[in-house]
Image: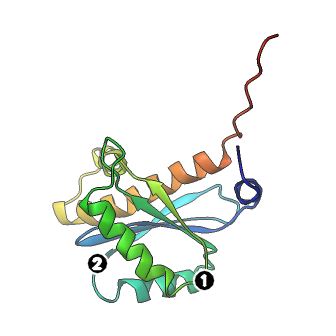
Amino acid sequence: MFSISDLVLRILKMRYLSIDYGNKITGLAICDPAETFISPLMALPTSNVLISKIIQIIKSENVEALVLGLPLNMDDSVGPQAKKVQAFAGQLKKQINIPLFFQDERLSTFAAQEKLVPMELTRKKKKYRIDALAAAEILRAFLDSKNSPPPTLGTTDS
């Protein structure tokens, strides 16, 4: 069953910024306010200025909500990397006043790598593009689940 906030989220269209947080590089992707187009935005070094750069992007791009990829283990458990992402989310939430959602990001990097196969890029250029593309994959999955029709209640035959 959906809560009122779930239903409102399905109706409202917003400009989302997706974050693929990594130990060395963090990828960012964004969608238009109609949630029609998703664009890999950039990849930034994961450093002590990452949050301030994200805040600058939130302001300059009029971002209304964040989607943070959560790298769960294949058995749905929270591993060491997911704990790092949750800690980063906690730091970020202290400095922003927009909603932050988590999205399961399993296999997002693999999907991004598949898209780069036909391109002839250097290893360094691929590394940064992969993270931004992975952020776009995370955002696509979030918007697909957000915009999918709500499940119908089962009926019983009498």
Frontmost residue, 145 versus 39 = 145
Determine the residue positioned at 36% across, 48% down: 106
Image quadrant occupied by the C terminus:
top right
First-in-chain label (1 vs 2)? 2
Give x and y (percent) for residue 97: 60, 83
Kindly check if marks 1 and 2 are in contact, taking CB atoms under 8 A apart as contact.
Answer: no
Q: Which residue is mark 1?
A: 97
Picture quadrant of residue 59: bottom right
120 relative to 138 in the view: left or right = left
In the picture shown, does residue 94 fall above or below 109? below
Most extreme residue toward the left, as rendered? Answer: 123
> From mark 1 to mark 2, how far is it between C-alphas?
22 Å
The three-letter code of the residue at mark 2 reads: Thr
In the picture shown, does residue 135 fall above or below 42? above
Q: Which residue is mark 2?
A: 46
Give x and y (percent) for residue 41: 45, 69
In the picture shown, does residue 1 fall above or below 40? above
153 relative to 46 in the view: left or right = right
Give x and y (percent) for residue 94: 49, 85
Residue 60 visible in image: yes
Residue 21 visible in image: no
The three-letter code of the residue at mark 1 reads: Asn
126 relative to 90 in the view: left or right = left
